[in-house]
Image: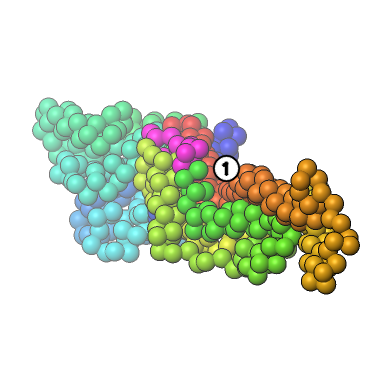
Amino acid sequence: MTGALDRRLQALGEAAELARGRLADADVDAAEAVVRRAGERLGLGVEATVIALAGPTGAGKSSLFNALAGDELVAAGRRRPMTSTATAAIWGDVPDPLLDWLQVSRRHQRNGGAPQGMVLLDLPDFDSVQRTHRIEVDRVLELADLLVWVVDPQKYADAAWHDRYLRTMAGHAGVMEVVLNQADTLGDGAVEACRTDLQRLLRADGLPALPVHAVSARTGAGLDELRRAIERRARERSAAVARLAADVGAAAQRLGAACGEGRGGRIGRGDRDRLVGALAEAAGVPTVVRAVERAHRRRGALATGWPAARSLRRLRPDPLKRLRLPDRGGEEGTRPSLPAATAVHEAGVATASRALAAAASEGLSHPWPRLVREAATRNEAQATEVLTATMGGVDLRLREPRWWRVVDGLQRVLLAIAAVGVLWLLVLLGLAWLRLDDVVPTPEFHGLEIPTLLALGGTLAGLLVALLARAVNRVGARRRARRAERRLRTRVAEVADEQIVRPVEAEIAARTRLCDALRRAGAGR
């Protein structure tokens, strides 16, 4: 009998846990109280049925209580308030722990006349001038299995009853009965008219099928019909489970207002790419990419350029070393020397993260757009800091091309040829100074002296090779810069997912799980 209720209670407990910190504390507290109270009530057994008589001042609750109990168990009269604490009439063997849980100290054991396990409670007036009386009523009304509202022809339209209790407990119609007491004070035909008007008010409260019993505790008119109605509930022994199910449904409905009709949007690729781009700018990725390109060109010039001019290149610092960035990736904690993010960069990250959150929460009801936005912006500054601190751990894969060594060897050969030619020319110059140039003939090739050909040819060939290698290195530098940018953006994307995207997805997933749990909790409504 309680299997379905147990599953709904488990779902409500799960929903309350997910809602904590996200939805209003009062609603979460109420849901947790329902779970706790239901566990206590089920632990005490559902064989007994607790029936509470509640109503306003002067409605005749105590007189009706005495009439149903078959004895003058409580004082009834015109002096108000007559009842200050709950009084119980008990039929059969009702466990004391249940009565202790109800905190009912005034107990009267009855024999016969009602089903075993029926507990009838007479409560103070819910509109009593004594605040403690109203608190007592509200406390017991949360615990009772069946609520019997007792009103009179003068107060059945009282707004305090309708607004405070009936409208807020519209989902509890299955565990309510309404009694129009003091029907004997109405003239002929007025009883039915009064009952019809009361049913109209109940429909307006969202309780169209709630039974209304017209009785007179003084004359006994209609009393048998009322007694049969509440005794039938006691025999069925289903009121306790029905009441708890109604409590679960009401708590689920209260929390479920945050689910609305909208479904959580997905994080689009464009929104994520814009976020990654903004973080990349803030973390200095363009600076690193430019440094990679310049570093490759510099190193290529040092490896393949005309050897005589390489020393000038070495005077300029390596762009990557100046940024403290290793070629092949360093330790994760290596912090490069990159420029700090500017206000413009920070604004770009903030705009991108908020746009991502807005797209992900589009169509969701309050408070999810706010919660998703908070999840997206919570780690904005931290994301940029993490990126900057860990950029040195990215492997830029700046390997030296093999052809550099071949060209370097060729350049050294050409330099040697040019050097031989220059030395030969110097020797010839010395011989001419000594007037011995005719003694040692100078070889020629197609009319050009071999030393001159070697000096000029080696130098010009070396410069030509350097120019060709420079053009190839420019292409390679751009290619390596693009490859480094992809690897850096991969790292940026990882941090963006970790710090911003996943918290947003977690919040949307929490909403999905919460709303699913609430649907399961309210499945019996």
Residue at screen point 58% across, 53% down: 289
114 drawn magenta:
no
Residue at screen point 33% across, 30% down: 225
Q: Position of residue 319 (x, y in %)?
A: 62, 63
Q: Relative to 459, does residue 163 appear above or below in the rendering?
A: above
267 drawn magenta:
yes
Segment tinted magenta in the rendering? 255-272
- In the rendered image, the residue lying farthest to the right is 439
Q: Is residue 451 visible?
A: yes
Q: Report whether 336 appears left or right of 515.
A: right
Q: Give the residue pinned by disc 1.
A: 10
> Which quarter of the picture shows residue 262?
top left
State whether the magenta stretch is mostly helix, strand or loop.
loop
Q: Position of residue 419 (x, y in %)?
A: 80, 61
Residue at screen point 52% across, 48% down: 276
Q: Position of residue 431 (x, y in %)?
A: 83, 68
Q: Which is more toward the observer, 384 or 12?
A: 384
